[in-house]
Amino acid sequence: MTAHRLNPSISVSAVVLTNDDGQVALVRKRGTTALMFPGGKPEARESYLAAAVREVGEELGLVLAPGDLEYLGEYVTPAANEADTELYSEVYLGHVPSGVHVAAQAEIAELLWVVPNDVVINDGHLLAPLSAQVLDDLVTGRVPQAKPLEMSLEAFEVLVGEELDALPDEMVGGLDNVVFAVEDRPEDGSLDLLGVYEGHALSGRADYGYMQLPDRIVLFREPLLAACTDTAYLREEVRVTLIHEIAHYYGIDDAQLHELGWA
């Protein structure tokens, strides 16, 4: 059952991670007794989807792309480890690819694979309220589904233009002979690639000759829409994608992005 959002005290992303045997992953953090889904709180200016991808990587060592996760819905439940606290969760569904090994790491003390309709846990441990609710919804077929985010190419172009205009001058002021474009999908038709830089980093450029075409930064509408649950998240993902592709122009890696305060 989905509850309406009621100004909860804690907001998190959670991932219902399945394997080829139809089992679902539950994790237990160190010093706690509650078994819950992998996930955690979004960082500043981080979307729920991005947080879900990051947390699964940090907690289980599983590298996923945003397109690997399907949005299940939002839940409001009691928090597992904080008394008298309400938990708002954006819940996603993902799958561990065949042959890929995952293991508890970082703050995770235990990884347990359970069958949704026959959960067996050790004495002294308990099922977190969110986990209990979502597992029950999976068994009974009541899992809420989000309506896919829709936006025309024209409206998407306007949104991208607005987010580009909002980027700091020190980031975009040095761009030279670069154009921005929007396309529906990459050439291979996949939903995994959100954006791409087509050209050469500034440090590796030669002088442009007569009639030479500019480099391009392309954002892909359908993958970005598929990765987001509402327009606010879409704007954030567009912003992050723009920053990362502009960074390629300057030859900047992810670590340098953080040092510059761009990511």
Image (tube, grey):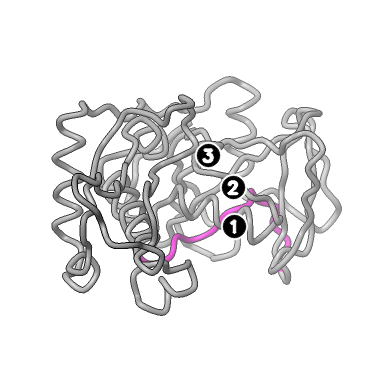
Contact (Cβ within 8 Å) of mark 1 with mark 3: no
**Cα gap from disc 1 to disc 3, whole angstroms:** 19 Å
Q: Which residue corresponds to mark 2?
A: 129
Q: Which residue corresponds to mark 3?
A: 92
Tell me where the magenta segment starts and ends, as one range: 32-44
Q: Which residue corresponds to mark 1?
A: 80
Contact (Cβ within 8 Å) of mark 1 with mark 2: yes
Badge 3: residue crowd in 10 Å (few <14, some 14–19, many ≥20): many
Residue 118: mark: none
Residue 34 is a magenta residue: yes
Contact (Cβ within 8 Å) of mark 2 with mark 3: no
- Of callouts 1 and 2, the N-terminal one: 1
Front label number (2 vs 3): 3
- In this picture, residue 199 sits left or right of residue 170: right
Residue found at x 71% / y 54%? 27
Residue 83 placement (x, y as % from top left): 53, 65
